[in-house]
Image (tube, rainbow, N blue to C red):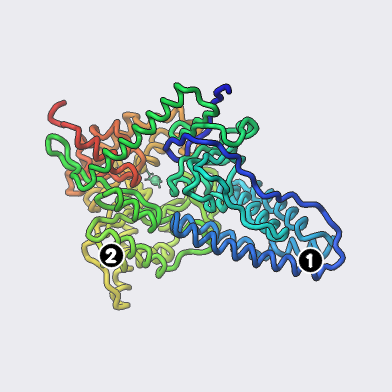
Amino acid sequence: MKMVKYQGKGVYGAIAIGKALKWKREDVQVKREKIEDVAQELERLRNAINKAMEQLESIYEKALEEVGEANAQIFEIHRMMLEDDDYNDAIVEMIQGQNVNAEYAVAVTADNFAEMFSAIDDSYMQARAADVRDISNRLILCLKETGEKSLIADEKVIICADDLAPSETVTLEKDKVLAFVTAYGSSNSHTAILARNMNIPAIIGVGEEFLNAIEDGEVAIANGFTGEFILHPDEEILEEAKAKQRQEEEKKELLEKLKGKENVTLDGTKINIYANIGSVEDVGAVLVNDAGGIGLFRSEFLYLGREDYPSEEEQFKAYKRVLESMASKKVIIRTLDIGADKQADYFNLDKEENPALGLRAIRLCLTRPEMFKTQLRALYRASVYGKLGIMFPMITSTEELEQIFALCEEVKAELTADGLKYSDTIELGIMIETPAAAVISDQLAPMVDFFSVGTNDLTQYTLACDRQNPKVDPFCNIHHEAILRLIEMAAQNAHKNGAWIGICGELAADTRLTERFLRMGIDELSVSPSFVLKVRDVVRKLDLHNA
Ligand code: PEP
Ligand code: MG
């Protein structure tokens, strides 16, 4: 058979070679039927909701074990959606008002809600449309009294689907899945996030033609690095893919050997390699990959995907757990960086013309001091459990820092008055992610213990390229000399004033720049946990004396 190549987007880098299997979803087609006994139909609906709630509970437990709490939370959200009054009332009213069967009422309500979510100009809310369809399909299957779907295959396969709902992804029997490939989907969807966390090679957005072309059992290659899906590969391509697979395995094994080794160049220059995390669950990956500390804990993830602010106690527990797990290693927690692309309804943020230039991060915290102080209290209280650094995002002026420090002093005084302890060796630092901060880094450096360069935002603000807009990618040279000079300027000013400087944006893992960063005197690079050993490898091969 002729080899065919399809191009999608790789969301987890690894290569799978094996038989393709089309994902057959349970039939959720429903017919409109007239019912006589409304009370009985409502009783059926109630039973189905209970059953669906039980299923979601056990999926949540499974996800908790496999992908951690932060990722499992989506199923808690599904449970909340199933209990949502507006959703339930709409179904009940339809059954009562139109004497229709529950399946039909659920299907229509699902369409209405999904459309409503899709129409909202917010990618997080748009993604909820898929969730409402997912819970509604589950409810319909429960009404039809069909069992939970599970994959039946006696060997490992590449799952090919139009799209996979988060609940489907997590219920896949992991030991039978080589990879999954979907016709649709976005890289920010929960499904993509789950794939990354489950370490399953995955490709999304291949386009729907590929599904028609597949017969179950045909050999295919899913290349999660390039996003290529190849059906009926010829001998040569197959051998190439196998060789690449072996290479990746060997690379992994070689990197394993670097565990426990120092991050030191051939000429003896040392650098710290830390890891970035978004939740308490990520600490496992930090330890497994032998990072020297946590250079960026994006604390805003504690605030996302929920209905209300996390309490001081909840935050304290999260920070304490990370600090304790890292033992004596440094943990830098960044204060809330909400706004722009990271939104949560309960903040009630005004719609802004240019949210990336709007009331985000520290600006929001300084306009809501009580909210900010709750986080600071949690951080200061947790500080006695490890080696804490607190870092503030989106700084542009010394005045902002003065205001922040005044709030820190208030928090400390309040904690003392409450008889609560905090460490007096907390390091305070700022992110250098605006050109303004880099340019006045001589004034900012004497005020702080460290700088951490957020190259993601520093790039967007320096080159005037919205990081959310793929159309400006061609104009966004991430190695632009302007960015590198700003980093160098900040490094010199940090060192002149006894502060240290790290980089925690994506550029920190760009090994084409490792040498340049070392030459600038950067003290720390903070990267995704899975890049720690790769960067260590590059550092250990450099010789700065040999220009
Ligand atoms: C950055 O801007 O580089 C950064 C690390 O922060 P975030 O990506 O969370 O904005
Ligand atoms: Mg940033």
**Which one is earlier in the sequence, the residue at label 2 or at label 1?**
1
Q: Position of residue 419 (x, y in %)?
A: 29, 78
Q: Residues within 10 Å of mark 1 (few under 14, many from 20)?
A: many
Q: Residues within 10 Å of mark 2 (few under 14, many from 20)?
A: many
Q: Is residue 297 above or below residue 311?
A: above
Q: Quadrant of ligand 1?
A: top left
- Amino acid carrying label 1: it is Glu
Rounded to the nearest angstrom, the CA distance separating label 2 from label 1 is 56 Å
Mark sitting on residue 192:
none
Is residue 391 visible in the rendered image? The answer is yes
Report the residue at 63% width, 30% height from top.
213
With 517 as the anchor, is 24 left or right in this view?
Answer: right
Q: Tell which of 448 and 457 is nearer to you.
A: 457
Tell me the residue that label 2 is attached to.
383
Q: Quadrant of the N terminus?
A: top right
Secondary element at tag 2: helix
Q: Is residue 19 above or below residue 34?
A: above
Q: Tell which of 399 and 113 is nearer to you.
A: 113
Q: Quadrant of the C terminus?
A: top left
Q: Position of residue 475 (x, y in %)?
A: 44, 28
Q: Position of residue 349 (x, y in %)?
A: 53, 55
Answer yes or no: disc 2 within 8 Å of ligand 1: no
Circles 2 and 1: CB distance less than 8 Å? no
Tell me the residue that label 1 is attached to.
41
Q: Is residue 523 above or below residue 361?
A: above
- Amino acid carrying label 2: it is Ser
Q: Position of residue 345 (x, y in %)?
A: 55, 57
Report the residue at 48% width, 64% height from top.
309
With 172 as the anchor, is 334 left or right in this view?
Answer: left
